[in-house]
């Protein structure tokens, strides 16, 4: 027995998993999980020319990365052609769909005539059967498309889960093609047959589909199929207020994975983008599932905010187990040409540095000081590495060569040197950071030095 709540995500494999689709998937998933229902993944691959296996793989990988597990699927529409064909036959037999033999030229002429009359472009019903109507002679050698007999008038109304009641008059829409001449169904038809067969109870999708919904409702009705509830989510705008697009920055989940974001941060950020639970900005997967009941979805477009995403990610990096960070940072290190192992030493280094990083890319950038020579800037050298401080550094190096190699002992060595030279702590600590780490600001200097091996520190402290 299928549970009453079943949701789905139905991406077309013509590119990466877009952030907007990922957010829709997330809401559909959370809705199903909240109500103890099921979540289905369907691959809408009927655009054969543009669909690729590579894109399917990317979509599956992104779903996995985000932890959006599905109970059924992936179901591929191209595996279901026989089923769509059978439903088309059923509609034709019931007089609810018909064969249309119009050629592209006929349709062009129709369009031109309508434009000349100042009318809206629509199919004029040439091949639509009607009582007493004589259809044109069937042309030789032309494979027909199948059109749906859309009701000529009357309103289609639904209570949208996000936008509230929506009404569109049937005069606004025409007899759409539901199956192409090659037997491949069009989106609006395949989606209905699938949502029906898969007993989908709630359809969340982007609001660019609002104009498709009346057609789909009419087809559901023609099939005598129960209607799902529809919820149309507003688009996500870029930080410039324009539609989020590739030209304006990353739009794929994969790109964020590659840029060093954690999946739990992405999940949190995406969920909050267009949905709220009071003032909560940071929440776990479990909290999202507990809270997400389809309410509090925003009706207006959300704006992508890179600074906020970075803040959310920094929070999760801070909260992450160092051993996990060590594992996750390896590919970022590899990009810098560094082959490392996720061992205890790397985990300890991650623990030391993670509070300063908004992304794994930043973490890798910090970690490179352990693997590659550092190059302090000329400005830092000039400012902090004065001639007066060099003897103190040499004295400290002598102490560091002898002391126990652990933060407390290193701290003692630094304090003794500061006292000996009657200088202030930062006058020694900052040049130490510049020489060893290549930057003037780091976590506590004794802990940082202890995180290197003694030999590298002594080498880097040789200033003359
Ligand atoms: N394949 C459609 C898309 O990616 C699915 C729309 C829907 O969810 O019905 O936009």
Image (cartoon, helix red, strand yellow):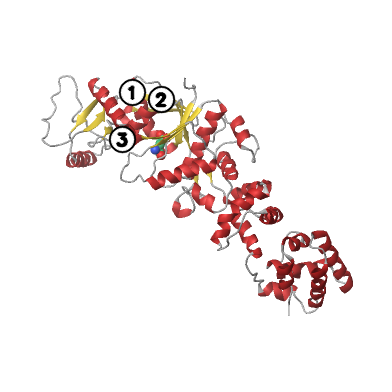
Picture residue at 33% right of the left edge, 21% below the top:
223
Instruction: Let me know if residue 377 appears in the view.
Output: yes
Q: Is mark 1 within 8 Å of ligand 1?
A: no
Q: Is mark 3 within 8 Å of ligand 1?
A: no
Q: Quadrant of ligand 1?
A: top left
Q: Is mark 2 within 8 Å of ligand 1?
A: no
Q: Secondary structure at mark 3?
A: loop
Which-is-in-front pick, marks 3 and 1? 3
Residue 225 as seen in the image, left or right of residue 116:
right
Q: Earlier in the sequence, mark 2 or mark 3?
A: 2
Seen in the picture, residue 324 relative to 455 is either above or below; the reply is above
Q: Secondary structure at mark 1?
A: loop
Depth check, front residue: 321 or 406: 406
Residue 448 as seen in the image, left or right of residue 276:
right
Picture residue at 66% right of the left edge, 56% below the top:
346
Residue named by callout 1 = 154
To which quarter of the image does residue 208 belong? top left
Seen in the picture, residue 186 relative to 252 is either above or below; the reply is above
Instruction: Let me know if residue 427 appears in the view.
Output: no
Residues tagged 2 and 1 counted as in contact (Cβ below 8 A): no
At label 2, counting other C-alpha atoms closer than 10 Å, the crowd grade (few under 14, some 14-19, many 20 or more) is some
Seen in the picture, residue 157 relative to 185 is either above or below; the reply is above
Residue named by callout 2 = 157
Depth check, front residue: 236 or 418: 418
To which quarter of the image does residue 414 belong? bottom right
Depth check, front residue: 376 or 249: 376
Residue named by callout 3 = 186
- In space, the residues marked 3 and 1 are separated at their CA atoms by 24 Å
Which-is-in-front pick, marks 2 and 3? 3
């Amino acid at each position: 027995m299928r549970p009453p709540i079943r949701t789905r995500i139905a991406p077309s494999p013509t590119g990466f998993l877009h952030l907007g689709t990922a957010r829709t998937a997330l809401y559909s998933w959370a809705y199903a999980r909240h109500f103890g229902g099921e979540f289905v993944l369907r691959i809408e691959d009927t655009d054969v020319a543009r669909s690729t296996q590579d894109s399917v793989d990317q979509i599956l990988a992104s779903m996995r990365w985000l932890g959006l597990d599905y109970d059924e699927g992936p179901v591929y529409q191209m595996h279901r052609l026989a089923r769509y064909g059978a439903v088309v036959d059923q509609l034709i037999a019931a007089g609810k769909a018909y064969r249309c033999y119009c050629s592209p030229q006929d349709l062009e002429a129709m369009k031109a005539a309508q434009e000349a009359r100042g009318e809206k472009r629509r199919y004029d019903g040439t091949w639509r059967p009607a009582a007493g109507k004589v259809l044109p002679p069937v042309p030789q050698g032309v494979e027909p498309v199948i059109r749906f007999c859309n009701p000529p008038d009357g309103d289609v109304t639904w209570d949208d889960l996000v936008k509230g009641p929506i009404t569109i008059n049937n005069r606004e829409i025409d007899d759409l093609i539901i199956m192409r001449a090659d037997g491949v169904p069009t989106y609006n038809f395949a989606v209905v047959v699938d949502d029906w067969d898969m007993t989908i109870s709630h359809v969340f999708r982007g609001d660019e589909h609002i104009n498709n919904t009346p057609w789909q409702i009419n087809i559901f009705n023609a099939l005598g199929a129960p209607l799902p509830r529809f919820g149309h989510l507003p688009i996500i705008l870029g930080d410039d207020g324009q539609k989020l697009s590739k030209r304006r920055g990353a739009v794929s989940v994969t790109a964020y994975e590659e840029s060093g974001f954690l999946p739990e941060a992405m999940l949190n950020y995406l969920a909050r983008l267009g949905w709220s639970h009071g003032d909560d900005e940071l929440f776990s997967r479990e909290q999202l599932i507990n809270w997400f009941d389809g309410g509090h979805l925003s009706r207006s477009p959300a704006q992508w905010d890179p600074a906020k995403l970075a803040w959310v990610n920094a929070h999760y990096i801070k909260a992450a187990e160092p051993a996990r960070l060590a594992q996750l940072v390896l590919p970022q290190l590899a990009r810098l040409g560094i082959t490392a192992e996720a061992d205890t030493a790397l985990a300890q280094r991650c623990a030391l540095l993670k509070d300063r990083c908004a992304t794994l890319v930043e973490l890798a950038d910090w970690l490179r000081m352990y693997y590659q020579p550092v190059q302090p800037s000329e400005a830092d050298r000039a400012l902090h590495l004065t001639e007066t401080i060099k003897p103190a550094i040499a004295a400290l190096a002598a102490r560091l060569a002898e002391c126990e190699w652990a933060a407390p002992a290193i701290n003692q060595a630094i304090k003794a040197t500061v006292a000996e030279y009657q200088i202030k702590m930062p006058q020694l600590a900052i040049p130490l950071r510049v020489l060893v780490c290549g930057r003037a600001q780091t976590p506590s200097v004794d802990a940082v030095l202890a995180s290197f091996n003694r030999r590298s520190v002594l080498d880097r402290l040789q200033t003359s």
